[in-house]
Image: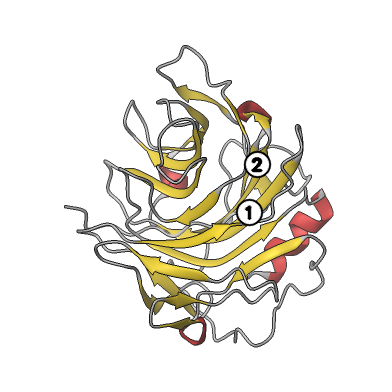
Amino acid sequence: MWSREIAIAVLVGCGCGRLGFAPQALASSDATDTNSSDADPCSALSAGLIAYWPLDAADVASINVLDRSGNSHHGTLSGPNPPTVGPGRKGDALHFNATQPGWVDVGSLPFDVAPGAMNTISMWFYRAGPTPINETLLFFPTTAIPAAPRYDLWLSDAYGPLSLCFNGGVGDCWGLSDPAMLLDRWIYVTLVIANGPMVNGEIYIDGMPVNMSCQFTSQNNCDQSRTATGPVILGADDVYAFHGRLDDVRVYDRLLDPSEVATLYACSQ
């Protein structure tokens, strides 16, 4: 039974060099502000924005989660114990239950599915320690039944130190390992999701690119080929549920350049 919390944030690289671990600490792990969902603080970065879920109380009605991008990609709270609204990094956030799984089903999004294309997702997340953890933060099932191959963002210590990584659904983990960086604080994470070999993808934390490597695999390598397509689920897959907090999730159908990434992190504070 899990008693810890996580919230994830995804942002694309900032072009200021690659990190092993050098996140910018926040004044408080539970810091909040009163930003309203009525005005997007990152409106200057509207090109390619296909979905934006602030996840404030004003954006969640019954089981419906409002997309504020104007593209009507609204989500649905689902699962045995759907996430609930509570304090977040920016205003409110969705809290994912520590005993039974719950998730947000946002259906299929119009990603760029061309071979070699890149898409970008950003969000805040918080996951309290301690480990062990084996959880899915973001999930792209390729069919209605979520079997491999698929495309996940995983938070896992299944085979060693806690890692944040891309997972192709076959026990592989392409990402970074650093429990001190990944637990007990709000983190803004940006994912560059590559169509093709997952090793072409990148992860940025608090506006900085991180060093990535094959943390573990059951296939002798992490070079699985995947595409960002199909339904999108926040907070769970068919087995592993996320237990923590997610806030201010954005999806782009393009690669953000380094200056845009830096701007996105700054305006998402």
The x and y percentages for residue 252 are: 71, 56
CB atoms at circles 2 and 1 under 8 Å apart? yes
Q: Residue at x 69, y 85 (%)?
A: 39
| Residue lying at 38% horizontally and 37% vertically, measured from the top left | 162
Q: Amino acid at mark 1?
A: Ile
One can see residue 201 in this view:
yes
- Check disc 1: other Cα within 10 Å, few if <14, some if 14-19, many if 20+: many
Farthest residue to the top: give it.
220
For residue 46, which quarter of the picture? bottom right
Amino acid beneath label 2: Ile
Say which quarter of the image contains residue 36: bottom right
Q: Which mark is residue 121?
A: 1
For disc 2, the neighbor class at 10 Å (few under 14, some 14 to 19, many from 20) is many
Residue identified by numbered label 2: 193
Rendered view: 96 above or below 161 = below
Q: How many marks?
A: 2
Q: Residue at x 46, y 61 (%)?
A: 105
Q: Residue furthest front?
A: 144
Question: Is residue 18 toward the left or the right of residue 33 in the image?
Answer: right
**C-alpha span from label 2 to label 1:** 8 Å
Quarter of the image with the C terminus in it: bottom right
For label 2, the SS is strand
What x and y, as percent, mark residue 245? 40, 64
For the question of whether residue 25 can be seen, the reply is no
First in sequence, mark 2 or 1: give its number: 1
Above or below: residue 253 compared with residue 225: below
